[in-house]
């Protein structure tokens, strides 16, 4: 069956007609054109598809889009403020935490959820926060450094 | 197929009476479908927005609503303080996103012999509260789990809560598991223990084992340990009893011999940690990380 569903993504309401078994990542990418969210494994192992549902991370490849109705969905497209990159985006570029970039949107969403919950995480807490995200390029150290730098920056500015 | 998003238990029960299957976090149901293990049911009813299913109520007995997530279990003061083994287990599930949507009820009703919250629930004496359009009953967990992925619940029955008797202040519990990775992993084997002390000696101990039988199993023959101190001798006997009673399989994760050996090691570590917690020692959640058990750092 197909349902008329209202999805709230990055503050914008998207009415969309979709089959009940469609996954959220597929709907974001193919129906709404929000291709920042990546599909790697498509069965909940790699974290490339990570988005936030009411501020908390979810593997959107393995979440039914219809079940996201009434929740606020945040994708990587929702991080920047116009042309101004989000501090996590700026820092992951600065530290060299991006190579091919396929894992980056998912990493950013997990990191954003972590810093919202815990603005001053220890290294161990950062590792746990990103433990559902695989990266085959960077070796992780520079991604961890970007999260750390962002935490320091946000705390330093009193945010 | 169709999905109804329910906001009350009554709505869930009438949808289920009409044939719908409940979905909470979908981390077993939807992931199983993506992996091609099982098709999605024709009719689903989403239960994650039913407020009364998401409550933790302290008291005797304690109640944990079926849709309480692993993320909440591992940080909730009541669970960490009184039902520590459940918090240990929840903290090991998947990754932050798995724990954020995955629920206790989903873990229990999915019925996997590798479920991490199962052994803790058994040693804490939990029962499942099952509710259908015709009434409510409570079922002991060893009667609920009938085989891998199978439960004795009827199709129209919703698990509304796990109900756990109150515990004396001199008791402690712990759950440890052997894992090859520190995240996105399921137990190679795991063990939970609940220990109550009377001064320096053990007055009662319960142990349950993960991933060494078709369902979670409880270790029998522990009554003889009452009245003894939890020393190396007692822990060695615990390891032997656990290994004897396991009936593990070989699969790509481990051989039966390796599982039989390591289940003994996990059981003794679980009893040791539970006894130390019972004696008042602070060991943070999850005990796997606090004591460096399981995967290497
Ligand atoms: C990447 C990943 C890692 C994982 N790691 C672990 C792990 O380390 N340890 C572990 O134990 N599990 C793990 N799991 C499995 C899963 O996350 C847990 O079992 C979780 O608790 C399931 O909860 P859920 O709410 O997502 O269940 P769902 O998928 O929503 O439901 C599971 C089953 O239970 C039924 N059901 C759900 N709620 C109820 C209810 N209240 N009453 C009756 N029936 C119900 C559903 O119909 C379905 O058949 C992992 C899964 C993934 C994807
Ligand atoms: S695409 Fe969702 S976890 Fe890999
Ligand atoms: S940058 Fe290539 S996968 Fe992470």
Image: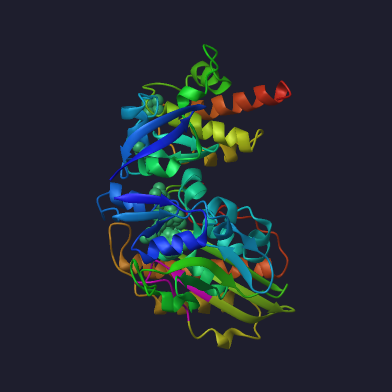
**Image vertical order of residue B16 relative to residue A29, above or below:** below
A146 vs A29, left or right, is: right
Count of picture labels: 0
Q: Is residue B12 magenta?
A: no
Question: Ligand 1 is located in which of the four quadrants?
Answer: bottom left
Find the magenta span and give its range.
B207-219
Is residue B160 visible from the viewing direction of this image?
yes
B179 vs A30, left or right, is: right
Is residue B179 visible from the viewing direction of this image?
no
Percent position (x, y) of residue A23? 34, 40
Percent position (x, y) of residue B276? 67, 67
**Image vertical order of residue B68 relative to residue A151, above or below:** below
Q: Is residue B208 magenta?
A: yes
**Image vertical order of residue B164 relative to residue A147, above or below:** below
Q: Quadrant of the N terminus of chain A?
A: top left
Percent position (x, y) of residue B169? 73, 72
């Amino acid at each position: 069956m197909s349902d008329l569903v209202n999805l709230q993504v990055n503050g914008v309401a998207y009415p969309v007609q979709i089959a009940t078994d469609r996954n959220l990542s597929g709907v974001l990418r193919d129906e709404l054109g929000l291709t920042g969210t990546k599909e790697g494994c498509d069965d909940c192992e790699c974290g490339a598809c990570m988005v936030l549902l009411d501020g908390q991370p979810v593997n959107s490849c393995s979440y039914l889009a219809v079940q996201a109705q009434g929740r606020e969905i945040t994708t990587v497209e929702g991080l920047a403020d116009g042309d101004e990159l989000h501090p996590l985006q700026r820092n992951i570029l600065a530290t060299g935490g991006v190579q091919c970039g396929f894992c980056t949107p998912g990493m950013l969403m997990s990191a954003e959820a972590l810093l919202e919950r815990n603005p001053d995480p220890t290294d161990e807490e950062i590792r746990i926060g990103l433990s559902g995200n695989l990266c085959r390029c960077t070796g992780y150290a520079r991604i961890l450094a970007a999260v750390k730098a962002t935490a320091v920056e946000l705390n330093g500015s009193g945010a | 197929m169709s999905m109804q998003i329910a906001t009350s238990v009554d709505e869930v029960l009438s949808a289920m009476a009409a044939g719908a299957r409940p979905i909470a976090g979908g981390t077993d149901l939807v992931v199983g479908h993506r992996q091609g293990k099982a098709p999605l049911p024709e009719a689903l009813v989403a239960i994650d927005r039913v407020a009364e299913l998401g409550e933790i109520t302290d008291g005797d007995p304690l109640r944990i609503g079926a849709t309480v997530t692993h993320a909440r279990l591992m940080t909730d003061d009541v669970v960490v303080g009184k039902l520590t083994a459940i918090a240990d287990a929840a903290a090991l599930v998947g990754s932050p996103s798995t724990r954020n949507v995955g629920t206790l009820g989903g873990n229990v009703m999915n019925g996997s012999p590798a479920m991490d919250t199962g052994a803790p629930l058994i040693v804490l004496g939990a029962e499942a509260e099952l509710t259908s359009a015709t009434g409510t009953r409570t079922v002991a967990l060893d009667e609920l789990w009938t085989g891998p992925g199978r439960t004795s619940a009827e199709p129209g029955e919703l698990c509304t809560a796990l109900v756990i008797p109150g515990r004396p202040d001199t008791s402690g519990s712990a759950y440890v598991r052997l894992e090859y990775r520190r995240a996105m992993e399921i137990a190679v084997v795991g063990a939970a223990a609940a220990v109550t002390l009377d001064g320096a000696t053990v007055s009662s101990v319960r142990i349950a084992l993960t991933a060494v039988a078709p369902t979670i199993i409880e270790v029998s023959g522990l009554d003889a340990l009452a009245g003894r101190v939890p020393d190396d001798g007692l822990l060695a006997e615990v390891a032997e009893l656990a290994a004897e009673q396991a009936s593990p399989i070989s699969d790509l994760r481990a051989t039966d011999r390796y599982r039989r050996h390591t289940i003994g090691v996990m059981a003794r570590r679980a009893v040791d940690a539970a006894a130390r917690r019972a004696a008042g020692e602070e060991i943070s959640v999850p005990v796997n990380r606090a004591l460096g058990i399981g995967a290497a750092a």
